[in-house]
Image: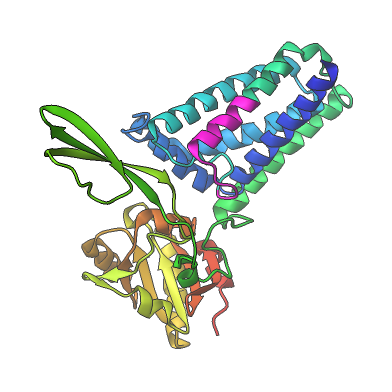
Amino acid sequence: MKVLVGISRIFVGILFLISGLIKLNDPVGFSFKLKDYFAPDVLDMEFLVPYALVIAIFVVIYEVLLGVMIIIGYAKKFTLWSLLLMIVFFTFLTFYSAYFNKVTDCGCFGDALKLTPWESFTKDVILLVLILILFFGKKYIQPFFTSGTRSLIVFASFVGCLGITYYVLQHLPIIDFRAYKIGSNISEGMTVPEGAPIPIFEYNWKFKVNGEEKIITTNGDYPTQDGEFISVETKEIQAGYEPPVHDFSIERDGEDYTTALLNEDKLIVIIVYNLAMSEKEGFAAVKEVTNEALKKGYKVIGMSASSQEVMDGVARENQFNFNFYFCDETTLKTIVRSNPGILELRKGTITQKVHYNDAKDLKLN
């Protein structure tokens, strides 16, 4: 039991540390995931949506600290109860997501590691078992270091977490795990490689034959069957390959400009995923950068999920010398965690990406 508790302690601590630090690298992204859970068709807790970022920061810092605390043996009773309550809640959440197919990615490891809902639930069940081992074998959890040293380590960890949080909120994530990281080519990211798995569907056709219902299963073809057709149910039995970049398009006035703009030699893109929720103080930096880019021969566009009327109104109000194009809001949130954010593309390849606070660091040539 002593050995089992020791192994469980290190495994749980490291997993909580890794999971927490990955999300701490991108608390804005984790807050988007929390908003998915708060939606009316999931947990129906819309009153928490305005506080999603604050909740995200609290949860991830707490997760990191619990990882540190269980490893060094700090405040054993408090730490074990916190671990148990947190994993019970997460296990319920991942089971709910998996069973009802509500949130297809729990965000447990941010964008670094994507888990299916059932994979997330399995991971939480394993963690629950390990934490229960720690809970019932707590007498074998011996603290490391002196009491004062343990307190200092926890406090230093807390301060370090606050420092990381401040930095990534004022700039961008330290490590970009997304498909739109610097160096990625958007056009290539949208392509499906030759020989990639294709989705396979099962079709259950319901007919009425001689007064009785009969179900015939095929993989797509309409069955040769006498009788009256009633309905068909479709079920995906094998997922196909999904390219890392999807739902990306650049549209304006009903026309698609994606291909043309991704072929531009020098393109500056201003991402404002929602103009109504944008940081208005960032527009001054945007205007300065875009005016300079136009002088140096760049094509400059804006991208937003707001309506055309709103986009054009903001452009006039701020005297921008470029037009806004429409793109899916989730896609824009994935591209850059700043609202507004600034990208440089060359032939569809992202060469620079900055928060509006770092607009002055954009190198135009």
Q: Please say whether residue 283 is one of the residues in the magenta stretch.
A: no
Whether residue 38 appears in this view of the structure is yes
Residue 235, given in percent of the width and then of the height, sits at 34, 41
Q: Looking at the image, is 230 positioned above or below residue 242?
A: above
Relative to 358, residue 99 above or below: above
Q: Could you tell me what secondary structure mostly forms the magenta stretch?
A: helix
State yes or no: residue 117 in magenta.
Answer: yes
Q: Nearer the viewer, residue 210 or 82?
A: 210
Q: Nearer the viewer, residue 224 or 277?
A: 224
Name the side, left or right, on which 51 lies relative to 171.
left
Q: Is residue 279 visible?
A: no
Residue for point 80% across, 21% down: 4
Q: Residue at x 45, y 68 (%)?
A: 191
Q: Is residue 156 left or right of residue 174?
A: right
Where residue 44 sits in the image (x, y, percent)? 34, 29
Q: Residue furthest right?
A: 146
The answer to which quarter of the image holds residue 40 is top left
The image shows residue 93, relative to residue 230, as above or below, that is above
Residue 99: x, y in percent? 42, 29
Residue 93 as seen in the image, left or right of residue 328? right
The number of callouts visible is 0
**Residue under the point 36% across and 29% down:** 45
Q: Percent from the top left, x then y, of residue 326?
A: 31, 65
Indicate the quadrant containing the N terminus: top left, top right, bottom left or bottom right. Answer: top right
Q: How is the image coloured?
A: rainbow
Q: Is residue 6 above or below residue 239?
A: above
* Left or right of 5 in this view: 90: left
Which residue is at 22% across, 49% downward? 222
Quadrant where the C terminus sits is bottom right
The residue range painted magenta reads: 111-126
The foreground one among 297 and 241 is 241
| Quadrant in the picture for residue 172 | bottom right
